[in-house]
Image (cartoon, rainbow, N blue to C red):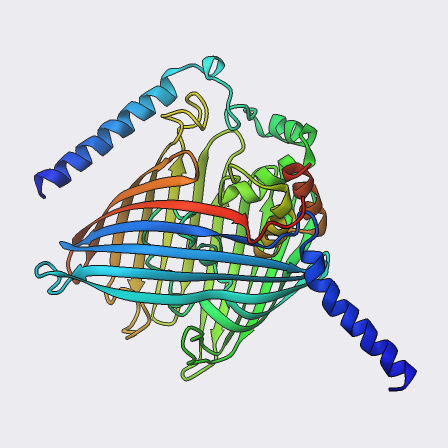
Amino acid sequence: MTITRKAFLGSWLALLSVGSAFAQGKPASSIQASRIAKQPTSSAQSAAATAAQNPGERKFQANCNRCHNAPEQLSPRIAGTVVRHMRVRASLSAEDERDILRYLAP
Amino acid sequence: MPSTYRWKFRKILSLLLLLPASALMAQNTPIISGGVGFLNSTNAGENSFQLVLAPVVAIPLGRHFLVESRFDFREFYNRQNGTSGPYEGTFFKSTQYLQLDYIASPKLTFTAGRFLTPFGTYNERLSAIWIQNLQDSPLIFPIGTRTTGSSDGVMVRGSLLSQPKVQISYAGYFSVSSDVDQFQSARSAGDRISVYFPTRRVEIGTSYARFLQGTRNNSLGAHFWWQPWNSPLQVRSEYAHGEHAQGYWLEASYRLSQWRGADSIVGRIEPLFRMQQVFRNSPGPGDGLPSADTKQADFGFDYHMPHEVRLNTSYSRKFSANGNANIWNMSLTYRFLFPAWRGHQ
């Protein structure tokens, strides 16, 4: 193994350790808000909370977000095309398509 | 022209005129999307570079039709003699899908043309360069997809059941044999059924494909995904059994988004691990699978940068009867998405 490879692996492991330590070192209450950190802790709470969310947002997170993140910017002009494209690719129902479109382009 | 024919002619003409007109309506402007990437790989000491452009085009036609396509253009550079000699480039292009979809009802969509073979989950969901976590596709990828991953023919798919607690989706296809450049496919048929529990974010499913030309054989697959709501953990796995081999892959990733949010410096980091194995039952020349029993562990480290840029790095150790190897991968990708033309606000 060359020195470059060793350096790459060493940096990779160091970054991984630091990242993991940061992620686990803070108690849950002090972690700043983020979309994922806001998720409740038990599945019962999860079901209740997700039901209370915007149905489009809930469906986006339950379906689309499993494979990819939401686009950072989405022009309202193309929102319908994007959602229809994903309806076919992800086998979404017509109702899911409507709700997700309403969420992405209110 | 008799009045009945004239009326029919006018009706068809107005429909043809309305189709592109409806595409110009708000929210339905055609899109150009996809990804560009720079890929570097060192596999058993052989270094290679790739410049990739993978555009996606989607054009809605009226309320029920959609034309969509994805192409792949790449320039592949490697050394003339593997590990020595000057670098030389080879250009590859492929049509991954070019299909017309007809959304017939809330639960049924007909597709005709060239489409991604619906076997397992990797091919349809994770193969795009701007989505994949690891640069290399799983070792068992060719099982059920016949190496190219695309089929020419017809497909029906949709959502059979969509309830808050359970969703069932299906896909079934028939593909013809084709040797046309950019449209190579095998005569085959198959299906996939998936059951998804949104409240648990658990999905299980099975796939089946039957190869219908030459020696007929079956491929079977199963997949399991789990992405808990309360954690950025993602667990994805597939098992596939083919005529000459079987195997599995299991991938776990954990984005560190619980530290200062997904957009913080640390929150953009996503370490991941994939374990995969292939067991050879008998020789299968040209099936795209390793020629001997192979075990591979992939350690990935991805960084989700702002503006849809992504850096994926990985180290893999491959154990095989044909020789062990180290594989180092690095890729930088950018995902783009914009209207094909200005359209109306």
What quarter of the picture does the N terminus of chain B occupy? bottom right
The residue shown at (19%, 36%) is A9
State which quadrant residue B108 falls in.
bottom right
* Left or right: B234 in relation to B29: left
Could one spot residue B64 in this view of the protein? no
The residue shown at (32%, 53%) is B136
Residue B66: horizontal and vertical position, in percent? 63, 61
State which quadrant residue A15 falls in.
top left
User: B197 or B18, which lies in front?
Assistant: B18
Up the image or down, A62 lies above or below B38; here it is above
What quarter of the picture does the C terminus of chain B occupy? top right
* Left or right: B301 in relation to A61: left
Residue B294: horizontal and vertical position, in percent? 25, 58
The residue shown at (84%, 77%) is B8
User: B250 or B73, which lies in front?
Assistant: B73
* Left or right: B272 in relation to A93: left
Up the image or down, B134 lies above or below B67; here it is above
Residue B207: horizontal and vertical position, in percent? 51, 62
User: B143 or A100, which lies in front?
Assistant: A100
* Left or right: B51 in relation to A44: left
